[in-house]
Image (tube, helix red, strand yellow):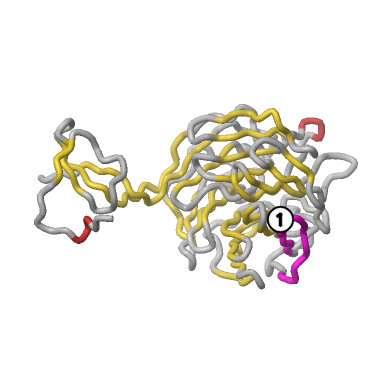
Amino acid sequence: MVAYTGIQGQNILIVSSDPSNPVEGQIWYNSTSNLLKGYQFATVNAWASGGTLGVPLGLGGQVGTQTAAVVVGGGPYVDSAISGKTQLYNGTSWTTSPASTNTIRQYIALFGLQTAAIAFGGENGAPVYAINSSESWNGTSWTNTNTLPTTIAAGQGVGTQTAGLAMGGTYLVNGTISWNGTSWSSVPATLNTAGPNGRCESSVAGVQTAALIAGGSDGTSPPYIAATESYNGTAWTTVNSLNTARTAIGGAGTQTAALAFGGAPSSPAVTGATELWNGTSWTNNPNSLSTAREGNSGVMGTQTASLLAGGRTPRSSPGNQTITEEWTGSTLQTKTITTS
């Protein structure tokens, strides 16, 4: 690969169209547009509109990337309306899959990718609210897997279809459960911050052995949680807190580069606030979601390219949304270079 950033005093390439696969620091002159251009990092840190969901989604699970995502389940606090519907995103539009989860559920947790995910826990209405069932998604259909050792509702998950982690939620309280691709097993690591009813609807990021959890609630009422904890595969460690305590937060990224967005800082208020995590502390971003709302559970994308699909606003009523917003952080982009 050519190291364009180290080249000085060389001729600038003249092309009729922009290179399809430029590298950082590359500069060229586009003879068609008569513009001098270069490929460089640009910090956008803003949300933009994406495709519209075919089915409104709230209290559901979401996972994947900005261009290949899956959302499932959800409900509007009404037992008869809880859904098992699965929707797929291709970066432009949503398609509703004919496949539904075998157990319909809201407050569902999800980890993995669009074509290989695990859904677990949640609520499926009276008479049994919290459930311990788990299902595997192969991109086409859902298959029941071994059950969790305890029921979980409004929990969180990170990882892959063969190596995942479940934490928090009602009934699990401050516990952690590991998934090895076949079965679940309780691990001795416990969250440092959790209420008597657990730690619910937090923002999460990372993988099974390097996870991050931020915010949430104790499963009852405000005040909500600002605490952030980091997991090294063995134990949870308390680190710097979110700037705004809130619950039902969307999450993306890794243990050292995460994103937390939306949520409820108080009841019934919702927010569009976005915070960035650099591995040490959270920073408020001036650009919020265009539509303030509570997020759905799951890691959706990265700190530089994330997604929030659906959600609820206002918190005091079902308010399930079909809105999708896409986040762009600091990315390499083709930029026009001015010489004046």
Report the residue at 55% width, 56% height from top: 244
User: Residue 155: horizontal and vertical position, in percent?
Assistant: 71, 53
**According to the image, label 1 marks what residue?**
181
Q: Is residue 98 magenta?
A: no
Q: Is residue 183 magenta?
A: yes
Q: Quadrant of the C terminus?
A: top left
Report the residue at 31% width, 45% height from top: 333
User: Residue 153: horizontal and vertical position, in percent?
Assistant: 76, 50
Q: In the image, 61: left or right of 276?
A: right
User: Residue 300: horizontal and vertical position, in percent?
Assistant: 56, 47
Q: Secondary structure at mark 1?
A: loop
Depth check: 335 or 4 in front?
Answer: 4
Query: What range of the chain is rendered magenta?
Result: 176-189
User: Residue 58: horizontal and vertical position, in percent?
Assistant: 66, 38
Figure check: 194 above or below 292? below
Q: Residue furthest right?
A: 127
Q: Which corner quadrant of the image does residue 295 belong to?
A: top right
Q: Quadrant of the N terminus?
A: bottom left
Q: In the image, 87: left or right of 102?
A: left
Report the residue at 71% width, 59% height from top: 180
Q: From where the camera sits, is residue 269 visible?
A: no
Q: Which amino acid, mark 1?
A: Gly
Depth check: 206 or 137 in front?
Answer: 137
Q: From where the camera sits, is residue 21 visible?
A: yes
